[in-house]
Image: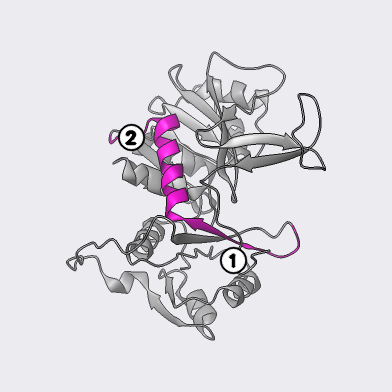
Amino acid sequence: FVCEISPWMVVASLAILQAGKIQLPLHPEQPLKAHQQTLRQAPPQLLLCSHLARDQGIELAGPYCRCESLEEFGLDQDPSPFEEVNESSDPCTLYFTSGSTGCPKGVIKSHRSLLHRCWLGGQHDQISPADRQSLLTHASFASSEADIFATLLHGACLCVFDIARHGLAGFRDWIIQERISLLHPPVLFFRKFLQSLQDHVCFDTVRLVALAGEVVVPPDLAAWARHFPRHCQLRHRFSCTETALLTVAHLNTWDRPTERVPWGRPVADKILEIWGPEQQRLGPGEVGELVVRSAYLADGYWQCPE
């Protein structure tokens, strides 16, 4: 599906998975050629699009499949009875990487891996039905899966905000108006956002801020402590598309390192080791390759078994 960051994006994601299909989210602001390359590698059966992305959806679907508008399906119809049509090992999502190795690759994620990521969200963030969690990341990025599915499966409220459309000032007002309790912003945006705030601004409803995607440095923590209540906690997380969540550091506003922010510890069911060139484990202080062992990794690359 191709859709902007909106409630329709969440509707599309849930509908595709409930139908037992594999979702392939596309960000409408990414170049058309990149999407065409993706669809050549993984031709879809159906392309869903929002009203705002309809023209782009029709152009993309042309040589590959039919295109349908999400809004035209309507939400006033009685939903069909839910049937369990998937096994836990079945694929549920295809994330195409940014192409750091030369060509974007499709990372296959199973229902098992997705549900394990949701379970980790409950363990570390202690999500409850009383929470109101931000969704700031497009579904085409693997980091969104915990925000969407962990929130809904734990009974919390998912609040959607489009950063690119509404900007820094809009984000400040939105946090207050929506009474956000779980805030998951991209690191670079959060850093810029904190720099834009006046000293008196404090977001009293936020009990947890989770940062990932970029390195967090001590000045970030000092700025965070100025604008969030003393009971607020911070999670510093490391992950990648192929492995999902790897490590989490738990920090408080009064517990701020001065030299560097720690990586934290490996999450449950993930074993991290440093290997040398002969695939031997290395000791403390030795430099090598980070190896992740787990039953909850991605299932490989789309049509690239090697």
- Pick the residue in front: 222 or 152: 152
Query: Label 2, on which residue?
Result: 131
Q: Position of residue 12 (x, y in %)?
A: 38, 63
Measured in 3D between alpha carbons, the distance from the residue under mark 2 to the one under mark 1, in whole angstroms, is: 36 Å
Q: Residue furthest left?
A: 78
Along the horizontal axis of the image, is 253 left or right of 99? left
Residue found at x 54% / y 20%: 226
Q: Residues within 10 Å of mark 2 (few under 14, many from 20)?
A: many
Tell me where residue 284 sits by quadrant. Answer: top right
- Pick the residue in front: 148 or 72: 148
Q: Amino acid at mark 2?
A: Asp
Specify start and end residues of the magenta stretch as a single range: 101-129
Query: Label 1, on which residue?
Result: 302
Residue 175 visible, this orientation: no
Give yes or no for residue 107 being in the magenta stretch: yes
Q: Amino acid at mark 1?
A: Trp
Along the horizontal axis of the image, is 232 left or right of 70? right
Secondary structure at numbered mark 1: loop
Q: Quadrant of the C terminus?
A: bottom right
Residue found at x 81% / y 33%: 287
Secondary structure at numbered mark 2: loop
Q: Residue furthest bottom?
A: 63
Q: Vertical placement of 245 versus 126: above or below? A: below
Q: Vertical placement of 83 versus 142: above or below? A: below
Decide which of tag 2 and tag 1 comes sooner along the chain: 2
Residue found at x 58% / y 46%: 243
Q: Residue furthest top?
A: 254
Please tell me how many numbered marks the rendered image carries: 2
Q: Residues within 10 Å of mark 1 (few under 14, many from 20)?
A: some
Q: Position of residue 106 (x, y in %)?
A: 60, 63
